[in-house]
Image (cartoon, helix red, strand yellow):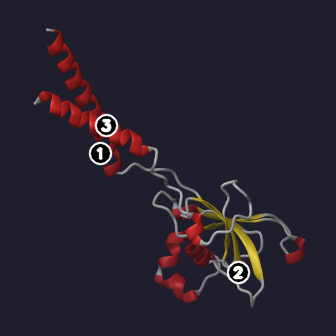
Amino acid sequence: MLTKINFFFLFIFLSAFFCAGKISAQPDLEKLGVEDKFGNTGYAYFNFGDANKVNIEVSVLGYVKNPGRYLIPEGTDFLTLLTFSGGPLVDAEMNDVRLVRLKNDTIGILQDQIIKINYNNLFWEENVSTRDLSVNPVLMPGDIIILPGEPRLFFKDKFSIILSISTTLISLAILMINILDRTN
């Protein structure tokens, strides 16, 4: 009976070990309609341009589902671009989003600007009704949206780590008991 338990734990351990390398957090970009404009650099190019309008290029970096360069119609606002990018990840700090607007003489931006956006303010009724542009700014060519954040471990993540370590230790203990029993 004890050897069946050993084989069971060994099978579980080896299955988890070999399956862990096959899980990928990267989205299948071909299914998303992403152009491979930059080769295999890992930098995605998303085309949401409208053939009947003037289109601009902006970048979204940080804790969003699909970071990369976006071709969007002129007049697109921050919240629409955030929707195009798949939305913020759970780990994003939405009260410290930054819009970096670099100097560009051709469109009248005379100096570099960093505009802080508090995403949480977008959902208060008084901000939605007034259409305050500092809360949801209209994007300009070359704008860079940065969503900062830091990874968090939730209970299920901690439980998974503890479970895998304890399973490994139990398997090793049972293996050592079997080895000692056979030598005696």
Q: Nearer the viewer, residue 144 or 6?
A: 6
| Crowding at mark 1 (Cα within 10 Å: few <14, some 14-19, many 20+) | few
Residue lying at the far right of the rendered structure: 105
* Residue at 50% in and 84% down: 126
Label 1: element kind: helix
Query: Around disc 2, counting alpha carbons within 10 Å, would you say few (fewer than 14), some (14 to 19), or many (20 or more)?
Result: some
Q: Which kind of residue does numbered mark 1 sit on?
A: Phe
Labels 3 & 1 near each other (Cβ < 8 A): no
For residue 49, which numbered disc appears in the image? 2
Question: Does residue 158 sit above or below 112 in this rendering?
Answer: above
Q: Which residue is mark 1?
A: 159
Q: Earlier in the sequence, mark 3 or mark 1?
A: 3
Q: Position of residue 164 (x, y in %)?
A: 31, 39
Tell me what residue is drawn at x 22 percent, y 33 percent. 7
Residue at the spot of label 3: 13
Q: Please name whichever residue, 44 or 64, is drawn nearer the observer in this view of the structure.
A: 44
Kind of residue at badge 3: Phe
- Residue 11: x and y, percent? 28, 37
Query: Which circle, 1 or 2, is nearer the viewer?
Result: 2
Q: Earlier in the sequence, mark 3 or mark 2?
A: 3
What amino acid type is highlighted by mark number 2? Gly
Counting residues from the N terminus, which is met first, the one under dot 1 or under dot 2? 2
Position of residue 19 in the picture relative to residue 58 (left or right) = left
> For the N terminus, which image quadrant?
top left
In the displayed image of the protein, which residue is found farthest to the left? Answer: 1
Where residue 118 appears, as percent x and y from the top left, is 56, 68
Q: Position of residue 78 (x, y in %)?
A: 62, 75
Classify residue 168 as left or right of residue 17.
left
